[in-house]
Image (cartoon, rainbow, N blue to C red):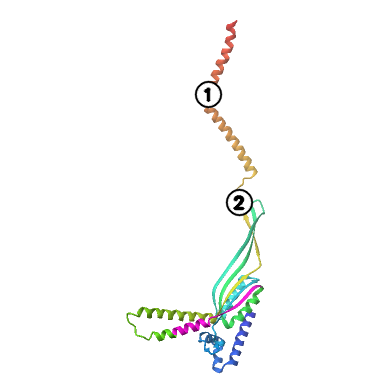
Amino acid sequence: MKTIKVLLALTIAGSCLASCRRAPSMENETGAQSEVAANATSEPSVTSDGINNDERKMAKKADVRSRVKDVLAATTQLERVTKEVGGIVMNSKLENREEGTYTQAFTNDSLKEIQTYVPTSTLTLKVPVQYLDTFMNVLVAQSEFINSRNLSLEDFTLQYVGNKLKQDASKANNLAPKNVDNVDYIDAKTEQNINRKLENLSINDQVRYATLTVDLYQPKKVTITLIPNIDNMVKPHFGDQLKGAMQNGWWLIKQLLIGIANLWVFILIGGVVLVVVRKYRTVKPAVKS
C-alpha cells in the first residue's frame, strides 16, 4: 500500500511540475487534471498543415493478463487505486475455475475428495488518462508474471471535427422559418444534431478516461474435503447379512409349509388312491389260488 501511495504522489507531483513549466501562474492553480480535462473537451484546430497534434482526440486502451500471488487481494487493491485517482470500476468479476475433481477411499464410511481450481478475476476500469502510467506501474508491482500487455490509441479527431462541422452547417440551414412542409425535415435534422453532439460527448469521455481490461489469475490451488461414503453406509454388514439370510430361509420354510397345507385335498386323495391300490394288489393273488 505504501508503494502505491508513493507512486500516486510522484505522479501528481510530476504533473504539477510539468504544468508549472508550461503555463502561467493561474494555470498552476488548476493542476494537471483540469488541464487534461480541458484538452479533452477543447475543439481541435485545423491548420494548413492538418490538425494540431496537441488537440487531437486520442483514446487510450490497455489490455493486460498477468499472474498474481493472491487474486482477491490484487483485485481489491486495483479497485481501491482506481477510486483513489477518480476512476470508475465498470466491471469486476471473481471466479474459481474448476480444473478437476477426484475421490479416494479414506475410511469405510468416508471418502477423500480432491478438487483443483484456478482463482481468476476480470476487471474493466476507466482511469483518468493522466494516471494511466501510475496505474500500470501498480499493476506490474502486483504481478508475478505478465502473460500479455497491449496498449493502443484510437484517433477520433476526424470524427469529432466532422460532427462539429455538420452541426454548424445544419444550424445555418435551420434559420429558415418552419412551416407545414418542412417541419418533418427540420425535426430530422434536429435529431441528427443531437446524435452528433452525443457522439462528441462520448469521444470526450473516451479521451479523458483510459479504458483498461485486466485479467488476473493465480497458481492452481488444491482443496481436500472428507465426504461420506454413501455406498458403504447403505450396504449392510456381515452380521446383518447373516441375520437377513436366516430370516429369508425361515420365511421359505414357512412358505413351503403353507404351500403344502394348501394342497391337503390332493394329498388326501393321493393317500386314498395309494391305499386302494395296495389293497387290490394284496387281494388279487389270493383269488388265483
Does 162 appear in magenta?
Answer: yes
User: Circle 2 is placed at which residue position?
Assistant: 230
Residue at image coords 63%, 40%: 242
Q: Secondary structure at mark 1?
A: helix
Disc 2 to disc 1, C-alpha distance: 51 Å
Residue 266, numbered circle: 1
Residue at image coords 53%, 28%: 261
Task: State which region is magenta.
Answer: 146-167
Q: Position of residue 272 (x, y in %)?
A: 54, 18
| Whether residue 226 is situated above or below residue 88 in the rendered picture | above
Does 279 appear in magenta?
Answer: no
The earlier-in-sequence mark between 2 and 1 is: 2
- Seen from this angle, which residue lies furthest bottom? 24
Q: Amino acid at mark 2?
A: Ile
| Whether residue 270 is situated above or below residue 194 in the rendered picture | above
The front one of 283 and 115 is 115
- When asked about the image quadrant of residue 216, the answer is bottom right
| Whether residue 257 is situated above or below residue 126 in the rendered picture | above
The front one of 65 and 86 is 65
Quadrant holding the N terminus: bottom right
Classify 10 Å Cα crowding around label 2: few (below 14), some (14-19), many (20 and above): few
